[in-house]
Amino acid sequence: MTSSIALSRLFVIRNSFQKQCRYVVNQMFHRYLLYTNVGISISLSGVGDTLEQHYEILQGQKDKWDTTRTTRMSISGMTVGVICHNWYRYLDSRLPGRTLSIVAKKVLIDQVVCSPICIATFFITLGILERATWAETKKEIKDKAGRLYAAEWVVWPPAQVINFYILPLRFRVLYDNTISLGYDVYTSYVKHDNESESGEEEHNETT
């Protein structure tokens, strides 16, 4: 009798917990979708840079983890996340539906329009945070943006077919950021490539 009462209570607790989880998820991906998307973008941009920095440390290119750099990369995730959130809403309003022709149009427009905007926003955000001059920021965009854009054409068209064809609007930024964790590592590498090379040269000079 005691065991059946305990089991019954366990089921009640489990059902209550599941109900609360569903409520939280529903609030996150409906009422507070913008905050959720931006939070995810901030977090995964920071994780991507952290992974890249620890790889650089293992390779002897850095001595220690630069938390300021990770903070800046996270903030760049915020600005890009806001753009992606509003972009998907706009794209769905202009091209509703999930037919193959609509999906193909969305993928093409996303690559041609949104990707360059996001890449430029990424470099401009970091330029502001690093207090770089506009001339320095423009030079960095000219030198490095092409590498990121080429990588985007490899990663995103197939990923976005799934995104636009299968997923509801509210889960698209979450999906993007999950897929882009590896890309975020590469983004951090491209952004700080010169820094890593100079750090490696200094390391070699001291050994």
Image (tube, rainbow, N blue to C red):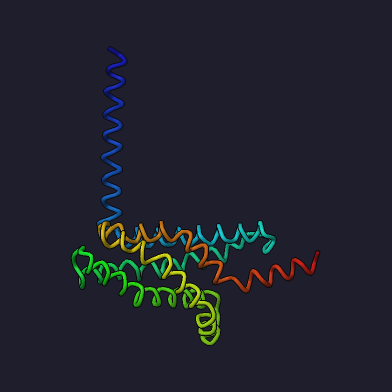
Which residue is painted at 26% across and 40% down in the image?
19
Pick out the residue farthest to the bottom.
135
Q: In x, y percent, where is residue 198?
A: 68, 72
- In the image: residue 124, left or right of residue 82: right
- In the image shown, does 110 or 16 lie closer to the viewer? 110
Along the viewing direction, whichever of 72 and 123 lies nearer the viewer: 123
Q: Is residue 193 above or below residue 4?
A: below
Q: Nearer the viewer, residue 22 or 195?
A: 195
What is the quadrant of the C terminus in the image?
Answer: bottom right
Asked if residue 202 lies left or right of residue 174, the reply is: right
Q: Is residue 64 left or right of residue 109?
A: right
Q: Residue at x 61, y 58 (%)?
A: 55
- Residue furthest toward the front? 100
Residue 43: x %, y % from top left = 45, 58
Residue closest to the far right: 207
Where's residue 128, x and y in %?
Answer: 50, 77
Q: Quadrant of the N terminus?
A: top left
**Quadrant position of residue 101:** bottom left
Q: How many marks?
A: 0
- Please determine whether, in this image, residue 21 is positioned above or below residue 52: above
Question: Residue 150's x, y, as percent?
Answer: 46, 73
